[in-house]
Image (cartoon, helix red, strand yellow):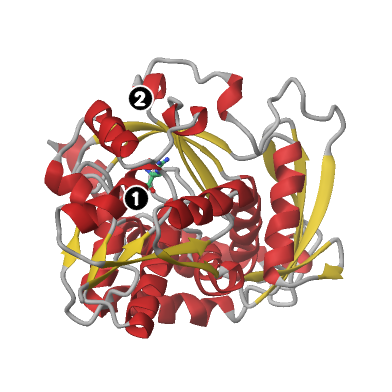
């Protein structure tokens, strides 16, 4: 009896993996694990139905709360970004793989299978976790190994009773979780093609968004959002509420050229309303409480953190080290930020913190707390080396 756990989304690629595991790889027991990170209900139902038709032992695992608290919150603290993309697909993959490991242990599986192709980023993210924490079980990637064309794959699927509805034959490839929605493929790959309105489902366009701005006040404790307009809420409810509010105002549409892990340059479209709003607010609060040197240093830490998370090295020791630094700074990231959401933009409209390194007295022109004439000494040495450079230049 050989048993395999498929990291299962219920889409075409992972569904095709089911008969393949039996016919081509010799497994007699196939277990499918679908991890709910906030994708549409219809995707979860489709996975369940297909698993039933194809006769697998199926599990749907709801990890939304864990995803928010242990993945989204650290991402907010690190202002998680890669090349202008508020990393979202990237941060869900390690958790999905981790749950597959958990279920493999539970059901006593001999191997893992996933449906990632050989061109994308997700193979790196999922396989890293399966290999690092998966107990040495082999990892099978049929989509990469067999190198099928889409037509061959659809044919194979049809032969095995996997119905290809309109939705799976559609031209866009969509990945969705609570932190973001990615739309790629088809015509969208052409960098000069204007994305049609139909690709968006979380955000309104500037022409349909409300004509009056929405002001929302986000409360933070230790670098994570805890309240909206003074109402305390759990992380999951807060992220969902922010998604709806920012999306309604058209915030979070992103169109970028992205360099994949392999170096492949691709055009990507995202909708990340909650991520854009919450990270904008979080950064504004850091700007208020951090010293000039902390701000400069943290931007480097954030850059490195974003790169590791994008590359799927979520459980890398350097990431743990960076998290330790980030968490120390977050002790002072307490207070609230007012955001103005209006026609595609989330702009900071105000910020306050008990740890603000700002003194109205000192910044004001009327202040007498230090004698301005004492500045003359400092001015005499400022830019000393630059001044020497210029005087030498004049001499020669
Ligand atoms: N390029 C993004 C990433 O690597 C998104 C990939 C999502 N996949 C999709 N089928 N839309 O994180």
Q: Secondary structure at mark 2?
A: helix
Which numbered disc covers residue 14?
1
Q: Is residue 374 left or right of residue 166?
A: right
Q: In the image, is the residue at mark 1 within 8 Å of ligand 1 by its beta carbon?
A: no
Given residues 149 and 2, the one toward you in this image is: 2
Q: Secondary structure at mark 1?
A: helix
Q: Name the quadrant of the C terminus.
A: top left
Q: Is residue 31 left or right of residue 27?
A: right
Given residues 225 and 41, the one toward you in this image is: 41
Quadrant of the displayed image that contains ligand 1: top left
Q: Quadrant of residue 102?
A: bottom left
Report if residue 205 is visible in the image.
yes
Report if residue 141 is visible in the image.
no
Q: Name the quadrant of the N terminus.
A: bottom left
* Among numbered discs 2 and 1, the one appearing first in the sequence: 1
Q: In the image, is the residue at mark 2 within 8 Å of ligand 1 by its beta carbon?
A: no
Residue lying at 43% horizontally and 33% vertically, measured from the top left: 164
On screen, 354 above or below 176? below
Q: Quadrant of residue 207?
A: top right
Given residues 196 and 316, the one toward you in this image is: 196
- The residue mark sitting in front, 2 or 1, is 1
Q: Quadrant of residue 131?
A: bottom left
Most distant residue in the top direction: 193
Image marks 2 and 1: residues in contact by CB distance under 8 Å: no
Please state the horizontal and vertical placement of residue 321, each as a whole percent of the image.
Answer: 34, 80
Q: Is residue 255 left or right of residue 45?
A: left
Q: Is residue 183 left or right of residue 105?
A: right
The residue to which callout 2 is attached is 189
User: How many residues crowd around disc 1 within 10 Å: few (fewer than 14), some, or many (20 or more)?
Assistant: many
Please state the horizontal and vertical placement of residue 285, each as a whole percent of the image.
Answer: 65, 63
Query: How far apart in space, not on screen, are marks 2 and 1 (Cα)?
Result: 23 Å
Residue lying at 77% horizontally and 23% vertically, measured from the top left: 208
């Amino acid at each position: 009896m050989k048993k395999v756990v498929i990291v299962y989304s219920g889409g075409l690629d992972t569904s095709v993996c089911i008969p393949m595991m039996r016919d081509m790889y010799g497994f007699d027991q196939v277990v499918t694990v679908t991890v709910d990170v906030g994708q549409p209900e219809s995707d979860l139902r489709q996975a369940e139905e297909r698993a039933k038709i194809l006769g697998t032992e199926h599990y749907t695992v709801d990890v939304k709360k864990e995803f928010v608290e242990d993945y989204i919150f650290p991402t907010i603290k690190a202002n998680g970004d890669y090349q202008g993309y508020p990393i979202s697909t990237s941060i869900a993959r390690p958790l999905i793989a981790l749950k597959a490991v958990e279920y493999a242990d539970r059901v006593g599986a001999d191997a893992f299978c996933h449906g990632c192709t050989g061109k994308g980023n997700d193979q790196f993210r999922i396989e890293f976790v399966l290999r690092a924490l998966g107990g040495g079980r082999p990892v099978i990637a049929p989509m990469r190994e067999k190198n099928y064309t889409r037509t061959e794959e659809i044919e194979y699927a049809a032969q095995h009773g996997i119905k290809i509805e309109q939705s799976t034959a559609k031209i866009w490839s969509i990945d969705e979780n609570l932190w973001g929605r990615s739309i790629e493929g088809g015509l969208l790959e052409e960098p000069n093609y204007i994305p049609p309105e139909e690709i968006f489902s979380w955000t309104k366009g500037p022409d349909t968004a409300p004509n009056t701005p929405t002001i929302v006040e986000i409360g933070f404790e230790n670098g994570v959002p805890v309240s909206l307009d003074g109402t305390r809420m759990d992380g999951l409810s807060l992220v969902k509420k922010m998604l709806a509010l920012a999306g309604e105002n058209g915030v979070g549409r992103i169109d970028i050229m992205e360099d994949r892990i392999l170096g492949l340059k691709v055009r990507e479209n995202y909708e990340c309303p909650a991520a854009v709003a919450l990270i904008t607010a979080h950064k504004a609060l850091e700007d208020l409480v951090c010293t000039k040197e902390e701000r400069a240093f943290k931007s480097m830490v954030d850059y490195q953190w974003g790169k590791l998370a994008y590359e799927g090295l979520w459980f890398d020791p350097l990431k743990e080290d960076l998290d330790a630094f980030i968490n120390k700074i977050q002790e002072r990231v307490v207070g609230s930020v007012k955001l103005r959401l209006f026609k595609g933009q989330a702009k900071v409209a105000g910020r306050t913190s008990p740890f603000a390194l700002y003194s109205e007295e000192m910044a004001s022109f009327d202040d007498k707390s230090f004698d301005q004439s004492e500045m003359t000494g400092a001015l005499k040495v400022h830019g000393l080396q630059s001044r020497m450079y210029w005087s030498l230049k004049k001499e020669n």
